[in-house]
Amino acid sequence: MAQDNKQKISDTTLSTAKIFVFGTILAAFFFIGLMMSLRPHVSVLEKRKLAEFPEITFLGVWNGTFFKDLDIWYSDTYPLREEMIAADKKVESAYGVRSEQIIAGKGDVPKKPDEIKPAEPEENLPDGTVRTIGEMRGPVYIANNCGYELYSFFEDVNLEFAQTMNNIYSRFRGVVDVYVMMVPTGAGVMLDKSVLDYLGTSDELAAVKFDYSKMDPGIKKVEVVETLRRHNAEYIYFHTDHHWTALGAYYAYREFCKVKGIEPHDIKDYETRELPGFLGSFYSESNQSPEIAANPDTVIAYIPKGTNKMTMINENNEREEYNVINDMTGASPSAYYLTFVMGDAPLCFTHNETLHDGSAVLVIKDSHGNAFIPWLVDHYEYVYWIDPRYTKNTISQMIRDYGIKDVIYEVGIYGASNPYMYGRYDQIGW
Amino acid sequence: MVFASLFFVFVFLTLNLLSQLLLPKPTWKNLAMLMFSLVFYTWTGLRCTLLMLLMVFICKVGAVCIEESKSKKIPLAVTISLCLGILGVFKYAGFAVSTAALITGENFTVPQIVLPIGISFYTFQLISYVVDVYREEIPAQRSYWRLLLYACLFHQCIAGPIVRYKDVQKDLDERNMNVSDAAEGVRRFCTGLMKKAVIANSCSLIADRMLDVGADALTETSAAGIFLGLFALHLRNYFDFSGYSDMAIGMGLICGLHYKENFNYPYISQSVSEFWRRWHISLCTFFRDYLYFPLGGSRCSVLLQLRNLFVVWFLTGLWHGAGWNYILWGLYWGVMLVIQKFVVRNHLSWLPAPIKILGITLISILGLTIFQFTDLSLMIIALKGLFMMNGNPLTDFGTALIFKNNIFLLLFGILAATPIFKIMRDRLKEKSETDTLAYVVFAACEIFIPLILFLLAVDALAGDSYNPFIYFQF
């Protein structure tokens, strides 16, 4: 009897403790959600504008769209959302066995591929190659107050990537011209070979050439590593962020023009917009490194001449109007990269009404493409771009609906090593 | 509103539980619960709420008429006809017209009627109530708002379990909330939320990667890829639906309401009939008690039994969706039952349990192929693809990669679909009654595991701006 009573007391205590812990956590999340001033307007992680508080209308209440949008707004702008997403990504990484992608370690040594036609030499340019040995802060390598992400090449995944591109190309051979432009990291362009060897990372030019050598000859390959290296004394990569600048994208655009056989526009002809104080991804990933904080970036953007207007089709299939080059003054400094086409979205397009030739290009891009796309606006009447991580469109659908003639795969060099990314290329590449 | 959203968990549920905790009397608790339930339902649109109010009114009047009139059959028939008529118009009008167009070749205009969320569930709940009044198992509820509370109780009105009025009447009247039930409710809710937000949603992504690809890509997909997609669906369906039921049962327990179990580890079933005794129990018992038995059940000639099974499984399929694939799926299971009952009988009882479980799993997965594809041409491609009849290969590197990237998730899903974690918990609990160390471990697990599951779930929800429950179309 005494034992039973003791057991009951224990059970009650345990139950009470369980309820108390759950209740406390629930209450904490509830109160954090009430703090309106903490709600973000832009997602740094996803590089997009977050949902806004919906307008209250009778129709919205009647058919439920107001409440649905309220739900989305609450979740989208919850103060701890990005931290929770980051935690979830860590959990997802334990779902299975994944290839190592972003590590500072020894990858495979890319085999010497067949030679690709080298870029034409330009006048002697200053050398901005970094030869300083810096330090690692988390996943970010820091030298001369600039951050770099390090790349490792793995033959198996790169072969799969090349095969994926070949499969896609075979479906559209003769229908559209397919371009592949692999974009290197800042480390691959700025750091000296001695530093790369010291860090045990792979030569990105060799990796790109290897991948291109495994692709169908019919795919038009745009090699940008060499031209970027030649211009590495210029401001072509951000110091505090893993993206290239608009100037870096411009040099890539010039290489694209060479492959396509068109004349690139002179950068001097463009009106610019500057926004100082950008602290990008390296700042947060290095746990707010003081070296990086001491060297903030200025986002310099070049406004297209034909049009600066773009349309975004968001996840809910709604149209939103933005600019190709946006004024991010007043936004969080970590979100300044949204200057370029307002970040990543399922589908966006521009219509340059100064052109009347029906020309249309489709860019399948990652976030590097954001700085590249503005350079295309003055060459095509229509520029469409999709982010394979978010889109539900397929290439054949885009070709049928929009008369696409050129398809450009802008692939950050990590995308070629990311089975999810090129898996998505394959899914939408029908 | 959906359970698996940050707004529901952090705002709605918190305020609801607070109201249930702080309000002292059962009537006040019930009124608050009714308000919350109406808000929950109105989240899908005020028009849907008005329809539900009408349906409840019809059943309230109908039940009173049944109780008071001498000829009970007429008000029963009228009430059920009205309920099914409303359900038919909103859920099946489009399907009926498009089918008529197909048969006659005429160009009818297919009506585009928005399906009110949960209409299938609360309609069946109200029908069960009305029939139970007819059978004199319960008295008619004279209070409209009490009947409304039963029908629209947000725990289960959107996606089940289908709760009988007689099972919750006493709980609703007395509202005995206690610490022990509440603690168990917390555990069930956290488990259910994790099942839905983490396992079900992740499996859904795998299934979409392999199957939601259009005819051309599906034709090229390897047999292993199609199977992987269907297997992921198989897991998703269980964790999505049972997770939702766990959440409903958990929230009920916290509030002093005891709903019956809706899933009993169906994936360890060794026969078709056992599968359907363990899967969506509330729906199966509904059809059994309100259709199969009144038709004669199995206490009649073989021909009539076959008729009864055909009717039940036809309607089971139709209940799941307004489409021929759903009807075919229901009939598929009917055929499987008939084969087991009349052909196989006990002839395979000698087979070891794992083989029988594998057999039922494969039967279930094959059935999923019919259920999943509303487009019959895609269904045929998928069925043929499973056996490499599209000229597709056995496997491909994409499938191997996706499998490799999700192997631990799938293995965990398989384990979690069995009672192994429950058995471990029960054994630890038993040991904790006599062993101090075991008690400490048990206590720590009881407190922290639900918390960990909860945090995993809300982290997963954070990335989903909108995360609908797959049974919402019902």
Image (cartoon, grey):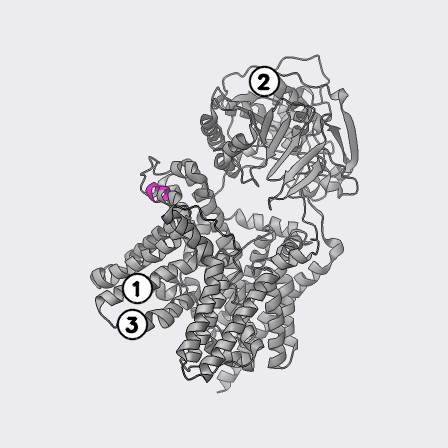
* Chain letter of the residue beneath label 1 in the structure image: B
Residue type indicated by callout 3: Gly
Relative placement, left or right, of B395 versus A403 is left
Q: Is residue B444 above or below residue B378?
A: below
| Residue A234 rendering spot, x and y as whole percentages | 73, 23
Q: Mark 2 points at which residue?
A: A259
* Chain letter of the residue beneath label 3 in the structure image: B
- Marks 2 and 1 sit apart, C-alpha to C-alpha, by 68 Å
Could you tell me if residue B350 is visible in this image? no
Residue type indicated by callout 2: Val
Question: Picture quarter containing residue A58?
Answer: bottom right
Q: Name the residue under label 1.
A: B309
**Which residue is nearer to you in this view: B276 or A292?**
B276
Q: Is the magenta stretch mostly helix, strand or loop?
A: helix
Q: Which residue is drawn at 54% across and 78% down?
A: B172
Q: Which residue is drawn at 24% across and 71% down?
A: B300
* Chain letter of the residue beneath label 2 in the structure image: A
Q: Is residue B170 above or below residue A99?
A: below
Do tag 2 and tag 1 residues touch (Cβ < 8 Å)?
no
Q: Name the residue under label 3.
A: B296
| Residue A401 rendering spot, x and y as whole percentages | 54, 32
Residue type indicated by callout 1: Leu
- Tell me the magenta residue range: B381-385
| Residue A318 rendering spot, x and y as whole percentages | 63, 44
At mark 3, the secondary structure is: loop
Image disc number at residue A19: none
Relative placement, left or right, of A299 versus B430 is right
